[in-house]
Image (cartoon, helix red, strand yellow):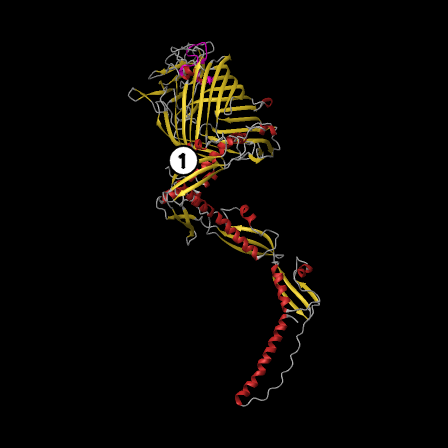
Amino acid sequence: MDCTANFRLTAALLGTTILAGLPAAALAQTGAAPAPAAAPAEAPAVVETITSISVIGSQRLEPDTIRSYIKLRLGQPYTQVAADMALKDLFATELFSDVQISNNSGAVTIQVKENPVVNRIILEGNKRLKEEKILPEIKLSPRQIFTRSKVRADVARIIELYKRQGRFAALVEPKMVQLDQNRVDIVYEISEGPKSKVRKINIIGNENFDDGDLKDEMVTKETGLTRIFSSGTSYDPDRMAFDQQKLRQFYLTQGYADFRIVSAVAELTPDKKDFILTYVVEEGQRYKFADVKVESQLRDFDGEVLARQLPMKKGDWYNAKLVEDTIDKLNETAGTFGYAFADVRPSYDRSKDDLTMGITFQIAEAPRVYVEKIDVNGNTLTQDKVVRREFRLAEGDAFNSLQVKRSTNRINSLGYFQEKFEVEQKSGSAPDRIVLEANVEEKPTGELQLSAGYSSLEKLIFQGSIQQRNFRGRGQTIGLSLSYSNYSKSAEVSFTEPYVFDRNISLGVNVYRRDYNSFNYLNNSRNTTYKQATTGFQVRAGIPLTEYISAVGSYTFNIDDISLDKSQFFTNRVNPTLNECDPLLAGRYLCEALGKRTSSILGMSLIYDTLDNRMRPSRGRAASVTAEFAGLGGSVKYARLRANASQYWPLGKGFIFSIRGEAGAIKSLENRGGAATGIDDVRLTDRFYLGEPEMRGFDIRGVGPRVIRQPIVDDGAGNPVVITDRNQVVDDALGGKYYYLTHFELEIPLGSGAREMGLRPSVFMDIGSVWGVRKPLLQSSPFPNGIFIPSRDTAGNPLYLQIDAVDASCNATSTSQVTSPTNPNPPSCLTGNANTALGSSVSPFQEVFVGDSIKPRISVGVGVNWNSPFGPFRIDFAKVLMKRPGDDTKSFTFNVGTQF
């Protein structure tokens, strides 16, 4: 009997009982009740035994599998309680969308409808979070069994992901699309909503500091027009907890030792678009330092001497950050004396009566430690010796924390291993032993780069290079590079061995070819003037003198070939028998530079370097002095001296201030001319030049001595007018024998969002000058007709155009080039027998020499470095505050490239 039949029988019995009582009630109203009759005996309950259990409706699951989920068994009595428990067990598997159980005289039938199989998961409306960020986080996936609980969990998980992105108004609506074969597509329709911003930050209880001072200490910022690109305006619970710590640190550095945050509440506005943050604080009293002492149990430390050197003094406002820094400094000092496990603990003596805080730094006794062993682990390609030779400590040496830190920096500078590598310190086999471990994670050191880009200097640029910075795991560097642009081409092969024969001596070789086209500007057009082709090689060797000072010697041999366009700059105006560089067209300073020459150069450099990072330093200094002597063979003789120095300071909160300076001088060791000739002893190609990109705000080679050729035109009344517009003059930079250049720059930190984009803005000031060249002999072409330069034959005779025959209209039909100024047989229609001289005319002009001054040029501006998705990008806006006559200025420059 099934459940429905049981229900009907029970109802019938109850109805019969009720109906049987109705006559008795009627009799009670009309007369005395008759004597009660004896109650009939109840029929015994029928309990059926389960004789079979059949399953219908299953498609993927076997009937035996379904029967295993329930507790109904053959031979057991069938009860309604057992049937209800079986229903619960089957629904608990989440494999079925519907289950029914029926009983027919012990034959139990289980009818099931299986949950569908997920065909695919579809996300719609997600723009801020890509599928690859969402799909790994949800439970449902294709070929799984659909369950409503998993869908609900997935909806909650997706909403949580959007909350982490600051989008608390995000909504997710799941939908199911039925397919054949009991399959479904699950569609999550996502409404991302706006990013929830921090509309307002309220601070209650602050009396000694205004809201603005405290908000400046927080990472979270209020939304506004000035913070469009800042990610700090988004609400983040973790950031809010960090801000509480920042507030606590700020007050503790200002002397408020009892400061506490009573509550911190984030309220979501009704529209779910913004948050209002409220902090309730108690500032407490402000304390000053009382007596500050040092008690040392280490024999090498005198507590009284150390106390006098501490940064805090009695009467100063209490500063918890200063206390922490002092603990680190004392630990570091103990480490330099070999006490690796020194324990420095501060003991506080707070007096609420006079609001003072006494501190005693207690340095516990510790054994002097020695390096027992140095282990290098994790290196599969790099040889052990490449890492070990960077350690400033050896096994058996007394431990020194400064040397450990220096070793860490040197290994990091190799660039072979993971970022933020640290040398780990572990206890040795005895209390006075320590083990240093270098647990490295190698990263690729081979680089293959092909790039193309556009530069405001070089226009289209193509570059390619291949380099291996850890060749064969020996720390060697080998590379090949090629570059091409409209005005320069180069090819170079290089090899560097940092430790020759495992000794601390470096050796490097470069072989190169460089072609460079110099240029000037005329009407904003860049015109090539001379071409310089350099082929050469350099051999260099370096040796460390101290930990931070090294010496590098070099030998360079160059073959230079400087040439001009003969059709543009060569004539035989000066010497009719020779076709040579014409100073009227090219200038004497350029004509004298032509030809081939060889340079044999010896160089020596002293280098000092304590930078924390050579690629992007934030702390430390570097300096170098380089002296070069050309003349040990070759045709060029000079002495050149250069100096560079830089200093970086971290100012806190991500600000980095730097000063970088350089200067140079060159002295010729040969007499090549004199004041009468206007030829300087130092060749044009060996001088110093200054401008973009070294000095922002000025054009390339835009600073220093130059010759400006100014056209002279007729004003219409026969009077000469000199054109001084820089867009209409020819401007040739001459360079100088001396120069200096200084950069002041402040790197400004942005929010975490901007840092993730790779944006690094800065403000700068550039100061520099180049000068010291001999004044050249200036050229001119007289007004009003200029100078005529005749064409000549190979013997130096001037050439003329002769008309030999004409047509009926006296137009020339036959001409020839002759050396005679007269025509012996002119056509009768011509009025004379003079031939036309061949040649070219140089329009009237005058040259002026300007810019040869030691006085500084000054520019200020802002710049942004951006590691964009399509390559590194640099943009600068500069304003020139001080310049000299003749300088070329340029307010805006950029450089962009890409890798592919």
Quarter of the figure with residue 508: top right
- Front in this rendered view, residue 559 or 462: 559
Which image quarter is the N terminus in?
Answer: bottom right
In magenta, the rendered stretch is 563-584
SS assignment at label 1? loop
Measured along the vertical axis of the image, is residue 345 above or below residue 164? above
Q: Is residue 734 visible?
A: no
- Residue 30 at x, y percent in the picture: 53, 89
Is residue 460 visible from the viewing direction of this image?
Answer: yes
Inspect the image, locate mark 1, and give the three-letter code of the amino acid beneath it: Met
Kindly indicate the quadrant of the structure image that contains residue 90: bottom right
Asked if residue 664 lies left or right of residue 51, the reply is left
Relative vertical location of residue 211 with respect to residue 759 in this rendering, above or below: below
Membership of 571 in magenta stretch: yes
Question: As rendered, which of 526 and 597 lies closer to the eye?
Answer: 597
Residue marked by disc 1: 312
